[in-house]
Amino acid sequence: MRMITSGEVAAALDFPGLIDRLAEAFRSEIAVPLRHHHAVSVPGGSEGTLLLMPAWQSGRHIGIKIVTVFPDNGQRSLPSVMGVYLLLDGMTGAPVALLDGPTLTTRRTAAASALAARYLARPDARRLVMVGTGAMAPQLITAHATVRPVREVLVWGRSPEKAEALAAKLTLPDVTIRATEDLEAAVRDADIVSCATLSTEPLVHGRWLRPGTHLDLVGAFTPRMREADDDAIRAAKIFVDTREGALKEAGDIVRPIQAGVLSESGIEADLFDLTRGTHPGRRSAEEITLFKSVGTALEDLAAAQLAAERR
């Protein structure tokens, strides 16, 4: 069994290749049971989460990702998300590779948002606002810039110092990256707004979204979490990575449905529909689109297969 390190996973999963591989996977037949999602109590601290995400492609591979999310880890100088991915032979069940989980997760998650943006963001989208400064932020910025002609990025975080540090650290060809403390003004002028936070209250408000904006929501992976308010849900055409996951786990979908703001039939399409051509995606330059990602084991399996092929 091979061990594929974080650096090796990152080197193998360039965004153009990974985005294409995810598109291929969503058009393929891959078995994806709903992931196991368990709350883990932490004495004296915030509740942790244990995620078990299996998937398999008949005759090729079986994969399972084991992930932990512990929000207080920043206080311990540890990442909030950690885990590993085990890739098995689909014919024999024999272990093939053990891959670094966090790097695989951040790369495939950003690639999924970029895949959605291919169908949902305007082709001329140049201004990106990144809400959040964690491990996902640089990946999302880079991935969106892979599929759209992004030339200006504004980074906002609860800690202005972390936003400044991220903006100073990340460099992309022909892209200006700056920090901002005025989230409302940034969103009002944005073409794409990408959010990757652990927020339990809305950060982006629908009244800020101008016509043509694409809103990409990556955080809020439990029903208690929220990144956009009900006005954003009302203003936008709603898309998800998978209906099954979004309707069970995504706070930005579950809570508006519970409040009667959104119906299940109000979800326009998922990534299966978009990649298979059963929904066209964005229909006009004026449309506001919203993509809610909760993640799916299909994406992990596709990314792990690609990394194993290239390493």
Image (cartoon, grey):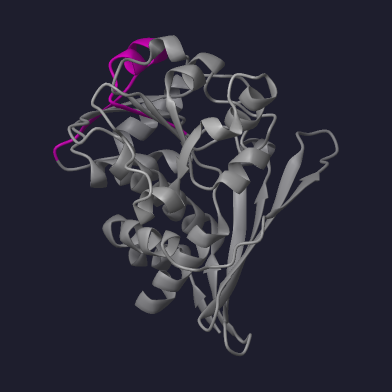
Q: Position of residue 293 (x, y in %)?
A: 50, 41
**Residue 188 magenta:** yes
Between residues 40 and 36, which one lies in front from this camera angle?
36
Using the image as rendered, state which of residue 208 and residue 290 is in the foreground.
Answer: 290
What is the residue that sits farthest to the left in this orientation? 174
Q: Can residue 200 be seen in this view?
A: no
Q: What is the magenta range? A: 174-195
Q: Name the outermost residue toward the bottom.
A: 92
Q: In which quarter of the image is residue 63?
A: bottom right
45 magenta-colored = no
Give the position of the N terminus as an image quadrant. bottom right
Identify the image quadrant of residue 253.
top right
Figure check: 66 above or below 40:
below
Please give the name of the residue rendered at 46% of the width and 63% of the height, measured from the top-left corner.
6
What residue is at 33 percent from the left and 13 percent from the top? 188
Provide residue 211's location: percent of width, then percent of height. 30, 17
Above or below — where is 120 with respect to 107?
above
Residue 256 lies in what quarter of the image?
top right
Residue 307 locus on image (x, y percent): 41, 70
| x then y, percent, for residue 112 | 41, 49
| Residue 11 in sight here | yes
Please state which of residues 158 and 202 is positioned toward the viewer in this rendering.
202
Judged left or right of residue 277, residue 226 is: right
Locate the C terminus and report the quarter of the image it occupies.
bottom left
- In screen coordinates, is 101 left or right of 118? right
Nearer-the-camera pick, 260 or 89:
260
